Image (cartoon, rainbow, N blue to C red):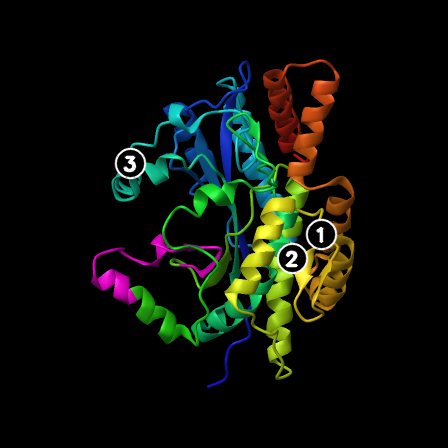
Amino acid sequence: MPIPKPDFTIGVEEEYLLVDLDTLDLAPAPSELMERCGAELEGRFSPEFLNCQVEIGTKVCAGVSDARAELQTLRATVARIAKDYNLAPIAASCHPFSDWRDQHHTDKERYNNLRDDLAGVVRRMLICGMHVHVGIPYPDQRIDLMNQLSYFLPHLLALSASSPFWQGEDTGLSCYRLTVFDNLPRTGLPPQFDGWGSYERSVQALVDLNLIEDSSKIWWDLRPSARFPTIEARICDVSPRLETTLTLAALIQCLTRMLWRLSQQNQRWRVYDNFLIAENRWRAQRYGLSRGLIDFGARQIKPFDMLIEEMIALVAEDAEVLGCTAEIENMRSILAHGNSADRQRAAYQDAIQAGDTPHDALKSVVKHLIEEFHADL
């Protein structure tokens, strides 16, 4: 029986933080806000672990053009309703100055169980991410493509990084989110499996011991979805700018199609050990776009201007077929203007140079994040 050709549909999930428009600190979502957003967005909106967080998720989209319309609607609706309660959403993976100790988790059975299971580690989860699903109907193909796609996770992280500040301090990292998230079990780079059966046996071993109820409690940077016939990229920080979100979604979709295309020619991307990919993951987490990544084939560190041109060329055919060439080429603009971590630091330094105190400068960063969230709506 021939393996069905994937349709490469995509779905995008984003998590947002809610801030008070007067203090610019985090604020819990009122129940009325949650009810109104839930009613208007019809299953595409939900609470998150902390009550200052919300999550949106698109419908299944044929491509980035559909995802653009969906995300514009979702972002605009959350922003409009939040404003009625003197709140605003920001799409950054860490709030610049709020303290996790002051936040409370959402009172739902799922989140109560997480609190009980993960104890003090989960209390620090004042972080937001972005997930992109790509439709791959055949299970073994999902695993095969996942094994190869892992190589590009550091590239995606560097482009998306939006969490340089934590509890009022510049961490020196472009992505502080992962230092918090990696404290949870079953996180980090995915293991390499030789097929769907191998993956299922590994998951079932934990299910049989009543350690997890299903694979939704596996939070790798890239995983087969527990609910959908997709592979789910979870490495990215959430992006303040909609255009960056769309570029990341397009890149994940195109890279997946490129790897599938290689398989049709009896070719494949070389699978490297996680020890090596983890080194690039750290470089992306620490330096973002500024120091480049290791090209293991060439055995050299390549700057991001070179890596981006290589990726654009690598997926050019796929971007044309999928109708997202403009979004792929937007990687050049991200590099030119910096990722969100770079822009947040610039906003902070501008405020300091204007005479603001460090705390007021951090408030200026939040104002910057609010402006970027609304810019493309």
Amino acid marked by disc 1: Glu
Image position of 23 with respect to 180: above or below: above
Measuring from the top left, give residue 355's x and y in whole percent: 72, 13
| Quadrant showing the C terminus | top right
Sequence-first disc among 2 and 3: 3
**Disc 1 versus disc 2: nearer the observer:** 2
Could you say which disc has been placed on residue 111 in the image?
none
Q: Does the residue at mark 1 contact the one at mark 2 (Cβ under 8 Å)?
A: yes
| Residue 210 is a magenta residue | yes
Left or right: where 308 falls relative to 37:
right
The residue depicted at 62 percent of the width and 32 percent of the height is 373
The residue depicted at 46 percent of the width and 73 percent of the height is 138
What SS does tag 3 mark? loop
Instruction: Pick whichever, 249 or 120, lies toward us.
Output: 120
Q: How many dots with numbers?
A: 3
Residue linked to disc 1: 327
Amino acid marked by disc 3: Lys
- Marks 1/2: CA–CA distance: 8 Å
Residue linked to disc 3: 108
Image position of 298 with respect to 346: above or below: below
The residue depicted at 69 percent of the width and 37 percent of the height is 342
Could you say which disc has been placed on residue 251 in the image?
2
The residue depicted at 30 percent of the width and 43 percent of the height is 118
Amino acid marked by disc 2: Leu
Measuring from the top left, give residue 338's x and y in whole percent: 72, 41
Sequence-first disc among 3 and 1: 3
Q: What is the span of residues highlighted in magenta in the rendered image? A: 204-225
Measuring from the top left, give residue 234's x and y in whole percent: 50, 52
Q: Does the residue at mark 3 contact the one at mark 1 (Cβ under 8 Å)?
A: no
What SS does tag 2 mark? helix
